[in-house]
Amino acid sequence: MPRRPTGARVAASSTWTDPDGVRMPAGDVHGWLPGTNQTVCGIPLSRASLARFPHVAWPDVDPATGAHADAVGHVCPRCRGALRPREGRERRSVPRRP
């Protein structure tokens, strides 16, 4: 079973500057893993003109709970699904056959 990506950051179609002068994501946001040149859902960053936000963690752009979601218009559902923590899925041990 493939492992879920960890340490995801944000790539976005637009930016805004908060009152402290820090550049924040806006518009359409996607999950991005530092060290790669594409979003978690496979969109190339340069071709889609997405800006990287290595200082913004993925959970912070959730409009319901995120700290940096003030100007987020749309969260990519494919990235959200790939980066969502698994709930209620504990590792089961398989009984050995005699």
Image (tube, rainbow, N blue to C red):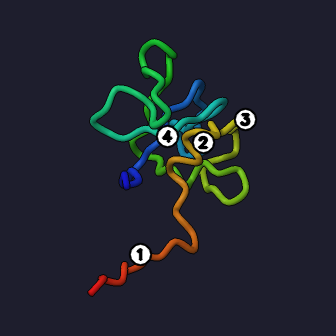
Viewer-nearest residue: 94 or 53: 94
Report the disc number at residue 73.
3
> Could you give the CA–CA distance between mark 3 and mark 2, rounded to whole angstroms?
16 Å
Tell us which disc is closer to us: 3 or 4.
Answer: 4
Residue drawn at x 63%, y 56% is 66
Residue indicated by mark 4? 31
The amino acid at mark 1 is: Arg
Q: Nearer the viewer, mark 2 or mark 4?
A: 4
Q: CA distance from mark 1 to mark 2?
A: 42 Å
Mark linked to residue 18: 2
The answer to whether marks 3 and 2 mark residues whose Cβ atoms lie closer than 8 Å is: no
**Residue in the image at 46% along x and 12% along y:** 47
Label 4 crowding class (10 Å Cα cut-off): few <14, some 14-19, many 20+?
many
Element on which disc 2 rests: loop
Find numbered disc 4 in the image and state the secondary structure of the residue it sits on: strand
* Res. 40 mark: none
Residue 51 x %, y %: 47, 26
Q: Choose the circle earlier in sequence order: 1 or 2.
A: 2
Q: Residue at left 60%, top 48%? A: 61
**What residue sits right under mark 1 in the picture?**
91
Closer to viewer: mark 3 or mark 2 = 3
